[in-house]
Amino acid sequence: MTIELILAVARSFLFVLVTMLPILNPAATAPIFLSMTEGASPATRALLARRIARNMFWLMTGSMLIGSYVLDFFGISLPIVRVGGGLILASVAWRLLGATPSTLDSRTALAEAYTPDHAHRQAFYPLTFPISCGPASIAVAITVGVALHDVEIVFSLARMGGALMALGLIGVLIYLAFRYGEHLLRLIGEAGTAVFLRLTAFILLCLGVQIVWDGLRELLLEVMSVPVHLAAVRAIVGAG
């Protein structure tokens, strides 16, 4: 039994890590974080990186453990979550695409205005949601949480433990990417950084549109399936 539990923990750890890490993708979201916190001091960015990693962990944990029950309680379907979250993600990316390059004076003003209190207000929205973990990752986390359940409570707890370990490791990777991402961007220079930020914002915009489209497509399929069900019911009633 002990070996089986260890294997269950290891499998769920690898399963969640392989599933969630490409979607959360700290390396891709780090440039967006740096762009939205321009003017912040290194200490403020380090504080934000810790809070975002912590927020991500609890948001993904809640989505895995109780996400499906919360949606059922409020009568919200996953396609609606995708449409709403995708719209938010696309709007944030659009603002990033339209942002003008900052001058030396504007950077000085940003540095004076970006206080720790300002950073605290932005830690969850929009830096954690939808930038670091958006509707796609929440939807996947809910699906993964359902897959981790087992008929035996002991194995369910073991799988959830492995999942939490994987989320903890992803949180550490997010912290490192956000905390030290500025040093990596310095290697490509200011011009290369501007191009990279615009490209990342465009990809983020496309991702938001894709998430909205996926949600709308599922909703349209549900609407189109209603006449089919009604026709089947009428055929059964007529045959009877």
Image (tube, rainbow, N blue to C red):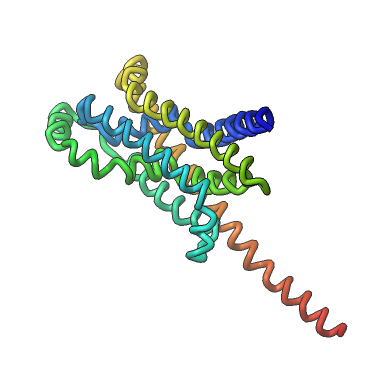
Which residue occupies the foreground of this view, 59 or 152? 152
Which residue occupies the foreground of this view, 194 or 234? 234
Where does the image place residue 103, in percent across and percent down from the top left?
A: 18, 29
Q: Quadrant of residue 93?
A: top left
Where does the image place residue 235, in percent across and percent down from the top left?
A: 82, 79
| Depicted 180 relative to depicted 156: above or below | above
Query: On the rendered image, what quadrant is the C terminus found in?
Result: bottom right
Query: On the rendered image, what quadrant is the N terminus found in?
Result: top right
Asked whether residue 163 appears in the rendered view, the answer is yes
Where does the image place residue 148, in percent across and percent down from the top left?
A: 61, 43
Left/right placement of residue 212 relative to residue 43 reads right
Q: Residue at x 67, y 71 (%)?
A: 226
Q: Residue at x 76, y 76 (%)?
A: 231
Left/right placement of residue 27 relative to residue 231 reads left
Q: Residue at x 67, y 28 (%)?
A: 3
| Depicted 86 relative to depicted 110: above or below | below
Asked whether residue 210 appears in the rendered view, the answer is no
Q: Residue at x 41, y 33 (%)?
A: 29
Where does the image place residue 164, in percent across and percent down from the top left?
A: 50, 36
| Depicted 26 relative to depicted 94: above or below | above
Which residue occupies the foreground of this view, 103 or 181? 181
Left/right placement of residue 221 relative to residue 210 reads right
Q: Quadrant of residue 115?
A: top left
Residue located farthest toward the top when viewing the structure as drawn: 187
Count of labels in the image = 0
